[in-house]
Image (cartoon, grey):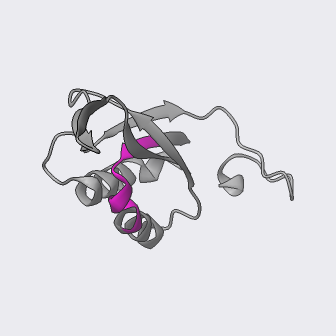
Amino acid sequence: MKLITAIIKPFKLDEVRETLSALGVQGMTVTEVKGYGRQKGHTEIYRGAEYAVSFLPKLKIEVAVKSELLEAVMDAITSKAKTGQIGDGKIFVTPLEQVVRIRTGETDGDAL
């Protein structure tokens, strides 16, 4: 089992969610986050004054999947979140030792 954490642009969420649902991914956690990478933020003008925006709004998606689905899910996120512009995001994959569904007590693959 793997935990996939993806940082994407906010307007790409619906496309990613629909594609993952079609693959059989049954749940995800989405968090509004701010950060920067190579794009280093940008400048904006507000009431005639220019100021730097160092942290840009992004979404963090967390999805737990069986190892067999890993490549398909990563390909789906990559294809649907990609705009070709700087700041499209990143995908991180970490192993999951154990998963327990609190309501039923199911464990590991059954709990996903």
Q: Nearer the viewer, residue 16 or 97?
A: 16
Task: Report the label total.
Answer: 0
- Residue 100 location in percent, x, y? 77, 46
Q: Give left or right: position of 107 versus 74.
A: right
Q: In the picture shown, does residue 43 fall above or below 66? A: above
Q: Give left or right: position of 97 versus 76.
A: right
Residue 57's quadrant in the figure? top left
- Residue 51 location in percent, x, y? 28, 31
Q: Give left or right: position of 79 versus 18.
A: left
Q: In the rendered image, which quarter contains the C terminus?
A: bottom right
Q: Nearer the viewer, residue 5 or 68?
A: 5
What's the magenta region?
Answer: 5-14
Question: Is 101 covered by the magenta stretch?
Answer: no
Q: Residue at x 84, y 51 (%)?
A: 102
Residue 88's quadrant in the figure? top left
User: For the view shown, which residue lies furthest in the front direction?
Assistant: 48
Q: Nearer the viewer, residue 84 or 76?
A: 84
Residue 13's quadrant in the figure? bottom left
Q: In the rendered image, which quarter contains the N terminus?
A: top right
Q: Is residue 63 visible?
A: no
Q: Nearer the viewer, residue 51 or 103?
A: 51
Q: Residue at x 54, y 32 (%)?
A: 95
- Residue 80 location in percent, x, y? 27, 60
Q: Residue at x 86, y 58 (%)?
A: 104
- Residue 76 location in percent, x, y? 32, 58
Q: In the picture shown, does residue 37 fall above or below 14? A: above
